[in-house]
Amino acid sequence: MDYHRGADVQVRIARIFNTYGPRMCIDDGRVVSNFVSQALRKEPMTVYGDGKQTRSFQYISDLVEGLLRLMEGEHVGPFNLGNPSEFTMLELAEVVKEVLDPAATIEFCKNTADDPHMRKPDISKAKDLLGWEPKVALRKGLSRMVEDFRQRILNDHNEGSENSSARYLISSPKNSTRHILHTCIKSFNWNTEDKKDNFHKSLATQ
């Protein structure tokens, strides 16, 4: 915001809340990927504390749409981009069981002292000024994520370069923000230098 106010730089500001979907790092420590990977491996899902703390989860396509509307619009922000629907950790575990494996079990562990009791974004500003709100329900999004995780876990894929797309997101006067973002999302699971080279070549030819 200082660059915008002091140097007249065009900026857009988003606060991104919990996001999930296919191609996440399997063992990144986030609760959704933890539960899904544990259930697929027939391990107990780890719930910290009493499991009554709440979180909200938005599917990746909803986040991308929100970012596109923000960057193509005239409003600077900041905007909260997240899903205001709250779930306790126990409720999330039950949804994972419903989607993946009804026989999955839960293991309770001691919680950390700094674990927040609630996280819920206020997206009223994004709804009013961007016309945006999340569309994908948790059960539907989890079903898509589970299929991706199942394939990678069962096939023991090497995910060493997960989430590397953000490091290769570039801008070009020849390409719209929408085109670049969609290309990055489609290429999100880069594992080789060839894929990254092809991405840059595709942008150069647009």
Image (tube, rainbow, N blue to C red):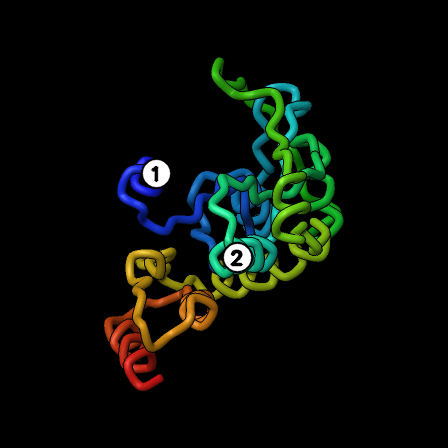
Left or right placement of residue 184 versus residue 138 in this view: left
User: What x and y, as percent, mark residue 87?
Assistant: 70, 34
Residue named by callout 1: 5
Give the distance between the C-alpha atoms of the residues marked 2 and 1, in whole angstroms. Answer: 18 Å
The image shows residue 27, relative to residue 141, as above or below, that is above
User: What x and y, as percent, mark residue 90?
Assistant: 69, 31
Looking at the image, which is closer to me, 139 or 134?
134
Residue 185 seen in this snapshot: yes
Q: At 47% from the left edge and 46% from the top edge, which residue is drawn?
A: 76
Disc nearest the viewer among 2 and 1: 1
- Amino acid type, residue under disc 1 in the picture: Arg
Q: Tell me if label 2 and label 1 are in contact, CB under 8 Å.
A: no
Q: At 65% from the left edge and 43% from the top edge, which residue is drawn?
A: 83
Left or right placement of residue 33 versus residue 157 in this view: right
Q: At 53% from the left edge and 49% from the top edge, which residue is drawn?
A: 37
The image shows residue 61, relative to residue 197, as above or below, that is above
Label 1 element class: helix
Label 2 element class: loop
- Residue 157 falls in which quadrant of the image? bottom left
- Which label belongs to residue 73? 2
Looking at the image, which is closer to me, 140 or 104?
140
User: What x and y, as percent, mark residue 112?
Assistant: 48, 18
